[in-house]
Image: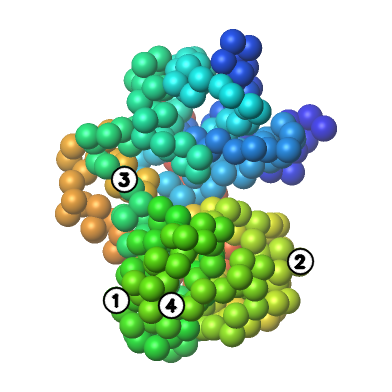
Amino acid sequence: MSVFDHPAFDDHEKVLFAHDAKTGLKAIIAVHSTANGPAIGGCRMWSYKDSSEALTDVLRLSQGMSYKNIMADLPLGGGKSVIMKPQGDFDRAELFEAFGRAIDALSGNYYSAEDVGVSPEDILNARRATQYVVGLPGGTGDPSPVTAKGVFLGVKVAAERALGSSDLSGVKIAVQGATGHVGAYLVQHLHEAGAELFLADINESALKDLAAKTNSTIVPIDKIYGVEADIFAPCALGSVINPDTIDTLKVKAVAGAANNQLATRDMGAELQKRGIYYAPDYVINAGGIINIMGDLDPKYDAKWVEGKLQGLRQTLGEVMDRAEDEGTPANIVADKIARERIEDARVRKAEAA
């Protein structure tokens, strides 16, 4: 199947396939839109089963970044990159320097940062070959705490719509991916707010420690969907709301940090049919990219970041209210708003040219 015929293509501006035989680099960089500014989005390194799976992931993630940035009212476009993790031993520093060369070939149309499987040190190695990376050590720092705070505020919005109150005291919340960078910070916020927590993660040792600190209940990974809770907070990888899991959910709302939580767009309608409120992921989890703006311009300080986080809360509330008023799935409402904003940005850019 051609890239142009891919279901997730969605009029991407550029898709770059980068290969470096010496280092074993096999990367895909997807630039969805630069209508509102340079595309920005992290790099994910993962053991994909094949290039088709990697392409699907990067296209969906890139589109999500466009929507995330425009919904957060940031002067940015959206892009993403993935690296197919080489099998066996490889020189990690050389691999990411080669990745930096691939980024540089886009001449500033795309800025990368860390994501799943990538560390700040990896981005430093990419920096040896390009200036178009952000989230470096010594800059704005780890974006995870800011992302988690935004998600926490979003959980409160979801609770208000689904439960009638934003007070999380005694609210039962199931968190998937609880020990991840964002998940662990979110769990702490929820614990301090008085929520009753049910946690699942593949890192058993870290999970035990976190559960002990937050008086939480540990749930097997494959059982987290069926927990009788009020809210499900997916904070691991995407496509967790799918035909195999949706009927096991026993919650009133889904609100979490993971990207691309819905396996397909129609899963939003399936949640709605079941009376489950949904907080669109790219609206709720934009805190990290908001924080990274400080690496691009020092005027985006902590006060500005906090204001933007509160803005996310307001935007999410508007999306969820409109979804309920119109009887339209929240993900469809959010997509429509994002596309309208991107198109408006395209028109302004064309007029200014």
Q: Amino acid at mark 1?
A: Glu
Helix or strand or loop: what does disc 3 sit on? loop
Disc number lying in front (2 or 4): 4
Disc number lying in front (2 or 3): 3
Residue that mark 3 sits on: 142
Residue at 44% x, 60% y is 206
Helix or strand or loop: what does disc 1 sit on? helix
Residue that mark 4 sits on: 216
Whole-number angstrom distance, CA of label 1 to CA of label 4:
12 Å
Q: Amino acid at mark 3?
A: Asp
Viewer-proximal residue, 295 or 189? 189
Residue 243, which numbered label? 2
Residue 260: where, in percent of width, then height? 59, 54
Q: Are marks 1 and 3 in contact (CB under 8 Å)?
A: no
Disc number lying in front (1 or 2): 1
Viewer-proximal residue, 336 or 131? 131
Q: Is residue 98 visible?
A: yes
Disc number lying in front (1 or 4): 4
Whole-number angstrom distance, CA of label 3 to CA of label 4:
25 Å
Whole-number angstrom distance, CA of label 2 to CA of label 4:
28 Å
Q: Amino acid at mark 2?
A: Pro
Q: Would you identify the image quadrant in which residue 129 lies?
A: top left
Q: Are marks 2 and 4 in contact (CB under 8 Å)?
A: no
Q: Is residue 33 visible?
A: no
Which of the two discs, 3 and 4, labels the residue nearer the N terminus?
3
Left or right of residue 22, residue 92 in this image: left
Q: Residues within 10 Å of mark 1 (few under 14, many from 20)?
A: few
Residue 3: where, in percent of width, then height? 73, 31
Helix or strand or loop: what does disc 2 sit on? loop
Residue 192, which numbered label? 1
